[in-house]
């Protein structure tokens, strides 16, 4: 029998990176590797990195520095620890990582994971690997089936890469151009995820609504059509998708929000800025009015739809007036929860060479103002849930004994005291309190339902 080897993977960045980490574990399983929770005595350590904002590379090097003594100890004991850097920093920095950290064995980008067995073999033979190829075989065609315990809420990547080239963003360079998987492959994977216990499928792509996959009938399917097919799969109870671009929100996808009972009423739709001038400089390819228009159409299709978004403040050339346009957009739309960042110049992107930089203290002050408005909206949204009974998918245990944590349809974290048998199920919860980042409530038992019915 093959000797079991310990594999430690640390993941940064977006959900696609989490999906990829699971798939790397899948492809290394036949080689005897089993995932472990600490790097201490691992036979292989993979850092699956993110390059989206500054200090990404520094963080990786400081982590590598911390891991180095573990590798040296393992070697002193006669063993071997393969040290690998994967993900978007690996794609962006390539050779430079091997130069700066001579104890790193492997550096490989997101489009090469299907070649891992071969790369591991070479690295075990003391070859140092750098693989940042984009062309060649498609990784999705070559990855094995997923492991059995993919979880009650499972990620499914359907699309990768981006052709939008927003001027601030590294993704088109680190993930390459847009690629959509084949529809049948996706549906087969969704069915396997359900067979393995998933109740919720979270459909992923860097630009997920640009999906245009080959359908079983030979035609090209859009995301709306794909979601309809996933909605038909028995056992799927919830569907979400992320991340979308406002310009790719076509009418068919918008209509799907009104039709599909399993599609959750929560949508992450990054806008970045409320100023047309800044949107143009960002090469976002949409205006403020297009964003409003899309939101209005979506609300018409599904009136209870809640929105989240991403914002960048302090983009080069952003004036106080531009920033006020962003604040105004936020007030106009009303968001359930959002992410907001200070602009960070990424090497190799057009925005990194732009003039008219916004002073750091001004950008920080704007970020603070924006975040305080977004927080207000988030608390107000959570407090609106008080008194409602919401179906909650319980997927985590809380810190306190007997506490369970799950997600509402609007993606809010909900804390309850409940029986452990409710883990990995959907149960109704009467919401009692709404906070900034979570809700609390009580499980609605059959007994309490009948009590309500009697009174
Ligand atoms: N594909 C998604 C988002 C990808 S990155 C989209 O199109 O919106 C996630 C978020 O990180 C972005 O929405 C943006 O708000 C932020 N981000 C990306 N590059 C950034 C940069 N250079 N500086 C600051 N924030 C950035
Ligand atoms: Fe980056 Fe823009 Fe593509 Fe999103 S749409 S991944 S922000 S380039
Ligand atoms: Fe980061 Fe790469 Fe995702 S840069 S956000 S891990 S696509």
Image (spheres, grey):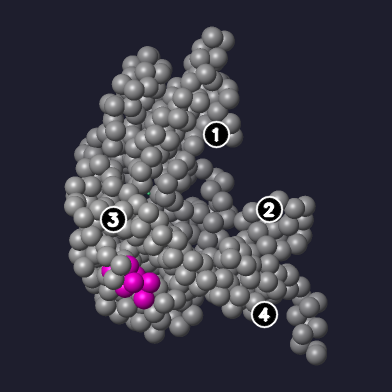
Some atom of ligand 3 lies within 8 Å of the CB belonging to the residue at label 2: no
**Which comes before the other along the chain, label 2 or label 3?**
3
x, y (%) of residue 19? 44, 47
199, above or below 39, in the image: below
Q: How many angstroms separate mark 1 from mark 2 (CA)? A: 21 Å
Some atom of ligand 3 lies within 8 Å of the CB belonging to the residue at label 1: no
The residue singled out by tag 4 in the image is 387
Magenta-highlighted residues: 322-328
Q: Residue at x 58, y 22 (%)?
A: 41
Question: Contact, CB < 8 Å: mark 1 with mark 2?
Answer: no
**Which comes before the other along the chain, label 3 or label 4?**
3
Question: Which residue lies most toward the bottom here?
Answer: 455
Q: Which mark is residue 394?
A: none
The residue singled out by tag 3 in the image is 358
Asked whether 343 or 33 is in front, the reply is 343
Q: How many angstroms separate mark 3 from mark 4 (CA)? A: 44 Å
237, above or below 196, in the image: below
Query: Which is in the foreground here, disc 1 or disc 2?
Result: 2
Q: Secondary structure at mark 2?
A: strand
Q: Residue at x 27, y 65 (%)?
A: 319
Q: Residue at x 54, y 74 (%)?
A: 381
Some atom of ligand 1 lies within 8 Å of the CB belonging to the residue at label 4: no
| Left-right relation of 398 to 205 | right
Q: Quadrant of residue 83?
A: top left
Tell me the quadrant of the picture where the C terminus can be found: bottom right
Q: Secondary structure at mark 1?
A: strand
The residue singled out by tag 1 in the image is 35
């Amino acid at each position: 029998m093959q000797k079991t080897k310990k594999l430690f993977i640390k993941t940064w960045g977006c959900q696609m990176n989490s999906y990829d980490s699971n798939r790397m574990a899948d492809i290394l399983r036949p080689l005897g590797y089993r995932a472990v929770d600490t790097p201490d005595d691992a036979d292989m350590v993979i850092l699956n990195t993110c390059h989206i904002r500054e200090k990404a590379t520094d963080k990786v090097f400081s982590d590598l520095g911390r891991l180095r003594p573990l590798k040296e100890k393992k070697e002193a004991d006669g063993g071997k620890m393969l040290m690998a850097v994967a993900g978007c920093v690996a794609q962006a920095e390539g050779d430079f990582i091997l130069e700066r950290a001579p104890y790193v064995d492997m550096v490989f980008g997101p489009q090469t994971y299907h070649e891992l067995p071969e790369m591991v073999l070479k690295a075990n033979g003391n070859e140092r690997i750098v693989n940042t190829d984009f062309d060649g075989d498609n990784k999705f065609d070559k990855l094995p089936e997923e492991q059995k315990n993919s979880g009650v809420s499972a990620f499914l990547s359907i699309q990768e890469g981006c052709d939008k080239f927003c001027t601030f963003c590294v993704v088109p360079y680190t993930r390459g151009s847009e690629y959509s998987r084949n529809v049948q492959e996706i549906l087969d994977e969704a069915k396997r995820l359900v067979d393995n216990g998933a109740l919720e499928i979270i459909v992923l792509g860097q630009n997920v609504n640009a999906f245009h996959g080959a359908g079983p009938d030979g035609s090209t399917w859009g995301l709306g059509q794909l979601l309809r097919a996933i909605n038909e799969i028995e056992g799927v109870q919830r569907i979400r998708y992320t991340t979308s671009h406002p310009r790719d929100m076509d009418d068919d996808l918008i209509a799907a929000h009104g039709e599909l009972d399993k599609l959750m009423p929560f949508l992450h739709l990054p806008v970045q800025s409320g100023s047309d001038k800044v949107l143009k400089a960002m090469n976002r390819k949409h205006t403020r009015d297009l964003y409003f228009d899309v939101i209005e159409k979506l609300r018409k299709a599904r009136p209870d739809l809640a929105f989240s978004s991403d914002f960048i403040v302090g983009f080069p050339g952003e004036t106080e007036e531009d920033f006020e346009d962003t604040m105004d957009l936020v007030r106009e739309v009303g968001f359930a929860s959002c992410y907001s960042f200070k602009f960070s110049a990424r090497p190799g992107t057009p925005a990194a060479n732009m003039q008219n930089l916004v002073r750091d203290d001004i950008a920080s002050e704007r970020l603070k103002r924006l975040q305080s408005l977004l927080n207000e909206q988030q608390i107000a949204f959570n407090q609106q849930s008080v008194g409602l009974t919401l179906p909650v998918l319980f997927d985590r245990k809380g810190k306190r004994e007997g506490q369970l944590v799950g997600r509402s349809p609007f993606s809010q974290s909900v804390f309850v005291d409940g029986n452990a048998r409710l883990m990995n199920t959907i149960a109704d919860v009467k919401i009692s309190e709404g906070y900034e980042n979570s809700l609390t409530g009580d499980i609605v038992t059959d007994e309490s339902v009948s009590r309500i019915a009697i009174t």
